[in-house]
Amino acid sequence: MSGEESKTPRRRIPSWVPQVLGYCLSAGCLIWVLHGYRWDELVPAIKDLDFRWVAVGIAADLSVYVVHGWRWNTLLLPVARLRLWRTVQAIYIGLFANEVLPLRVGELIRCYLLAHWNGLRLSVGFASAAVERLIDGFWMLTAFVITASLVKGIPEDLVILVQILGVLLILGAVVLLWVIVHKQEAHAAISESRWASTLRHVIEGLHLMGNVGTLSRTALISLLYLGMHMFSLYALLKAYKTDYSFWVAAGVVVLIRLATVVPNAPGNLGVVNLATMKALELFDFPANDGKTFSIILWGAWTLPLLLGGAVATALTGVNLGELRDRAKAGIREGPAAATPETEV
């Protein structure tokens, strides 16, 4: 066969397939949760809530993302000094996108906005987000080990999933450490291709962010970030008038976050409900109460973010669909490409 002979084009998975799979997963989980649910208990349960604790839980959840902004700024401090408000705004817009659009496109949007507003390369935003996820993963793994030591009956499939995530985290940490220590070798390892410039900027960003001081401070802020998320759920359990401890709430948050790793429908609807119900069952929470609490939890964690994200998006003067399109355009041009000139 001649080397000039045209190659058969690779068959690409249609873009709608992941979305359909995500919606099917969420729908299946929601059907599971609502099957046999006694709807007549929902309104009385909401009326019986201690709304002082509800307010505390919502405030804690909203504050989580201010801490997230602080953490992101701390991680990127060796690269650029960023304004906290702009970083938090980007995070809230990303969260808003995750609540209304499938497949967590908000992660892409928040990195695009951070790069656009601060004159950074998009690849640096992606690199910082990857480091965030790596640090979060180690704290989550640690929290899961503690939870597993306190609770009997952790599903075997979940244990296997955590073991797989643990291996991936170790591999990610090894790659990060190698890039930090062997910057020149990492540059040399990149072939000259369309993405070579992008990867070089990712490596440069990882190298700048990879000093011990920056990573240590980021890791400590990440612990606060996770702890506030746990406290939010603890406050909502108190609002539901249970006597569960903070450590139970921490265990439930760990299991919810692990269950929602896989992208699904907007707002994790269905998946977060099933994860909440099953996690609470491990702590002898009645099944129907677990379903009711999962609905209350989803509302308390989702509705305020929709409002805050809508306000943050409105302040840009650009609608969410346009932000998504601009972010995807940045990817198609190469994440290292300059940010668009259009003001946001």
Image (spheres, rainbow, N blue to C red):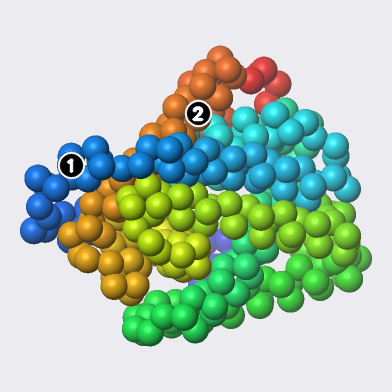
How would you rate the neighbour count of disc 1 (Cα within 10 Å): few for under 14, some for 14-19, many for 20 or more? few
- Tag shown at residue 308: 2
Residue 96 pos. (x, y %): 47, 34
Instruction: Please name whichever residue, 233 or 205, is drawn nearer the observer in this view of the structure.
Output: 233
**Is 116 rendered above or below residue 250?**
above
Instruction: Please name whichever residue, 343 or 106, is drawn nearer the observer in this view of the structure.
Output: 106
SS at circle 1: helix
* Residue that appears at 33% across and 52% down: 241
Question: What's the CA distance linking mark 2 and mark 1?
Answer: 28 Å
Image position of 223 (left or right of 289): right
Image position of 231 (left or right of 338): left
Residue 52 pos. (x, y %): 43, 38
Quadrant hosting residue 193: bottom right
Q: Which residue is mark 1?
A: 44
Image position of 202 (left or right of 162): right
Instruction: Please name whichever residue, 150 or 12, is drawn nearer the observer in this view of the structure.
Output: 150
Which residue type does callout 1 highlight?
Pro
* Residue that appears at 67% across and 17% down: 343
Which residue type does callout 2 highlight?
Gly
